[in-house]
Image: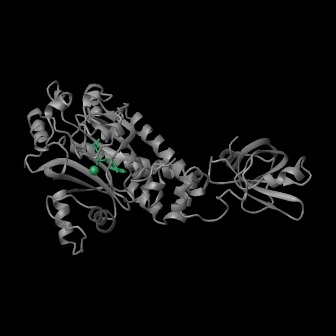
Amino acid sequence: MRIRRILSDGQPGETLTVKGWVRTRRDSKQGLSFVELNDGSCMGNLQAVIPAETPGYEEAIKDVSTGAAVALTGELVESPGTGQRIELRVGEFAVIGKADPEKYVLQKKRHSFEFLREIAHLRPRTNTFGAVARVRNEICASIHRFFQSRDFVYVNTPVITTSDCEGAGEMFQVTTLDLARLAQLQTTVDWSQDFFGKPASLTVSGQLEAEIYATSLGDCYTFGPTFRAENSNTTRHLAEFWMVEPEMPFYELEDNMGLAQEFIQTICRDVLEHCPEDMEFFNKRIDDTVRATLENITSNDFVRLSYTEAVELLEKSGKEWQFPVEWGSDLQSEHERWLTEEHFEQPVILFDYPRTIKPFYMRVNEDGKTVRAMDVLVPRVGEIIGGSQREERLDVLQDRMREQDLDPAEYWWYCELREYGTVPHSGFGLGLERAVQLVTGMQNIRDVIPFPRTPGHAEF
Ligand code: 4AD
Ligand code: MG
């Protein structure tokens, strides 16, 4: 039985064996050793009491040290101490794997998140990173439940691709060519000699392939790692992140916004309901507004505002912006956060952005100047979702591609979807790590993914 179950359901009198890692050990003068044991199943530790008469105590108790893996067998008893309902009276114990106290760095004290990033192999043993991992797991489970219960089909889209979905040129190239040799020879690259016979990259989004399945199977979603070689060292950008991308035929932008709102609300509600202990921790230790933020999100409709209206608000705000606001330029994080954190104090869905700043696949509006884009902005994080209604008219789509220096011939299969049974359709992408940031209150995106990849960092 894992410690989470023992702490909630364990009854005095039960005999059991518990395995885990020692958080602390304290020896009393009365000949008892008190061990706090954690097995990762929950934040709480199981208190175990090992009497000095226990077989092997003399030789082995010193190895029951912080970080060591142990197996403790004994009987659950009502705890006479405060702070726990039950504890384990140990009758037998074994040290499975030692941890040299001189070398094990995770002793009982606060470590900075920066330092813990350098020991990403040990940081999940801390309270914070254990809680992040469990909440991230709950969010993933909630995402699948949300779509499965609505009969969406989970589609696996490729990681290696030869198209640039966002058209932003932020792709990591994938090649088996010997670059060092090519540099030596100072030749030009013959892509036909490369593995795929042409340049290939890691995907920035599974959307284009999701559209293929959505226009055959109906509502579907992809959920996987995506890669962006943007050189932005911010607390909200990773080079490798996970994205959930639902795609729905017969959805117009308003339907898309409705689904996005329901989706985020469901994730927040599920975490509040299923991870109360971890959420208590985040609210107490990381950000004391996080629970109130989630409760606000789950109980109110999101504000819906056009990009043009947002620009007017920002211009009238009287704020000194680092980046000037002007119709036609992309909103920066400072603008997004002002709207959602200060002005509305709740999530905001911005829609109908200028066509010049958005990718080719977004549907052009009647005005010819804007496209049916939508971004969902939330407090503390800013943009958490980007999405749109897709351009379903072949001629308009091809014009948009040429406008953005893309060759429609290279996207022939995407264009053909508009030739055979084309339909209005929409979708969006939620950045998983930004969702974890929203829910936990963690400041830095590097601390909500197990092994962050950012410029200059790919250790572990
Ligand atoms: O707004 P984006 O670029 O939209 C797309 O990729 C669309 N193809 C989605 C779709 O319509 N199917 O990215 C979607 C979300 C962002 O809102 C953000 O949450 C996250 O992905 N994201 C990142 N997260 C971490 N690091 C980065 N570098 C990110 N770039 C985007
Ligand atoms: Mg975006």
Check the image and name the residue furthest to the right: 53
Horizontal and vertical percent for residue 188?
23, 37
Can you give x and y, in whole percent of width and height, for residue 297 in the image? 38, 56
Residue at image position (20%, 31%) is 414
Q: Which quadrant would the N terminus be assigned to in this image?
A: top right
**Total marks drawn?**
0
Q: Is residue 276 visible?
A: no
Figure colour scheme: one colour
Q: Position of residue 417 (x, y in %)?
A: 19, 28
Q: In this rendering, is residue 265 above or below 162? A: below
Instruction: Look at the image and tell me whether residue 176 can be seen.
Output: yes
In front here: 167 or 84?
167
Please indicate whether residue 138 sits to the left or right of residue 46 in the image: left
- Vertical position of residue 181 compared to residue 117: above or below: above
Q: Nearer the viewer, residue 166 or 441?
A: 166
Q: Is residue 459 left or right of residue 167?
A: right
Image point (50%, 45%), residue name: 138
Task: State the residue at coordinates (67%, 62%).
Answer: 108
Q: Quadrant of residue 209?
A: top left
Q: Residue at x 51, y 49 (%)?
A: 135
Give the percent coordinates (x, y) of residue 228: 33, 46
181 sits to left or right of 86: left
Instruction: Say which quarter of the image contains residue 36.
Output: bottom right
